[in-house]
Amino acid sequence: MPVMNTKHQDWQPVRPLSGGRWMGLCPLHADRKPSFLVDPGKSLFYCYGCGRGGDVIRFAEIYHDVKFPQALALLRQWRGGAPLLQQVADFYRLQLHRHGEAVGYLLQRGICSPQLIEHMRIGYAPGGCLRGWLRQLGYPLQALRQAGLVTAAGYDAYQHRLVFPLEGNLYGRSLSAAAPPHRFLPGSKGGLYAWEQARRYQEVILVEGLLDYAVLWQAGFRNVTCGLGTQLNARQWQQLCDGPRTVYLSFDADANGSGPQASQQLAHRLEAHGIPARRIVLPPGQDPNSFFVQGGDADQFQALLEAAQP
Ligand SMILES: [Zn+2]
């Protein structure tokens, strides 16, 4: 959050606090003793003097006395030009807590940890606002269509979806049962999710979906990764085989058998490459997400891990 640490005019922190936070003089009122708290990690500020606080956009709104779109445009100037997808992901992240339906959906899917939301950089696409914002930042409409962010008819491609940044793509999960649940931008879905973190472990848990990944990470499992579907692409397969490890597969226990079938095939393929694979057996009809949402805990999942069969 450049605006609140170094680049913001002449604001200087006076003293550090725990957790990487800072205190300084408030730029929003005539402050004599440091009463302005900044948390760069969370992009939040609060002033004990004038009682104002909020996120970085709120700060720009007050400081420059402008409305939301102008505040965003100013922030972008300070940040310098980030790549398009990062701009989009950042924009959607800022929307998340401004839309009750998005937070409500996260809770319904068992996601409540702010650390997790930060770790996965979860955002929300309300629809009907991305195109206007990016146009205001100077992106030509054609570029937005090409990236798949705007439809041929000119609408935001992601509407009422949670948004998860991937390498070179954005995954959009629909809040509504009426829309197709999963959406990606054109192009590759990228590699295994958060692989740099998971690959350090001797034992790795591979799940189908990001909401499965989320509940496991939140329950304390750091050796988890996600293939965004049951079929791995070449890059994901290569990653899974890039070192000695045991792979635990936890796909959906679908009634139609597609999850169990895919995990059996992948287990055989891994074993054929000399990589031990174990299949985690969930209660019928469940996936890791529903397992935790319905009251399962880390100990119970650990027991399923230990009971996993080749
Ligand atoms: Zn103040």
Image: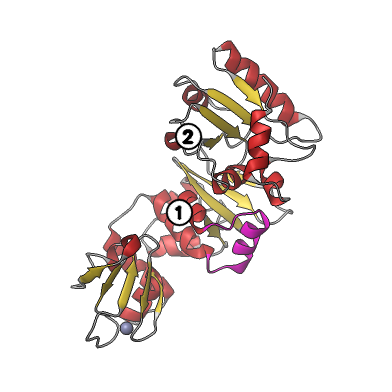
Residue shown at 60% from the left, 62% from the top:
102
The N terminus lies in quadrant: bottom left
- Is residue 68 in sight in this rendering? yes
The C terminus lies in quadrant: top right
Front residue of 190 and 251: 251
Front residue of 222 and 271: 222
Q: How many marks?
A: 2
- Compared to residue 290, the image places residue 308 above or below, namely above
Residue shown at 57% from the left, 62% from the top:
126
Q: Is residue 130 left or right of residue 63?
A: right
Residue topped by disc 2: 198
Front residue of 145 and 166: 166
- Compared to residue 13, the image places residue 291 above or below, namely above
Q: How is the image coloured?
A: secondary structure
**Is 102 one of the magenta-colored residues?**
yes
Secondary structure of residue under mark 1? helix
Judged from the image, the quadrant occupied by ligand 1 is bottom left
Badge 1 crowding class, 10 Å Cα cut-off, few under 14, some 14 to 19, many 20 or more, is: many
Front residue of 39 and 169: 39
Residue shown at 40% from the left, 62% from the top:
42
- Compared to residue 89, the image places residue 194 above or below, namely above
- Is residue 141 in sight in this rendering? no
Q: Position of residue 14 (x, y in %)?
A: 21, 72
Residue topped by disc 1: 89
Q: Position of residue 156 (x, y in %)?
A: 55, 57
Badge 2 crowding class, 10 Å Cα cut-off, few under 14, some 14 to 19, many 20 or more, is: many
Q: Amino acid at mark 2?
A: Ala
Q: Which stretch did the figure color magenta? A: 97-113
Tell me which label, 2 or 1, sits earlier in the chain. 1
Q: Where, by quadrant of the figure, is residue 52 drawn?
A: bottom left
Q: Amino acid at mark 1?
A: Ala
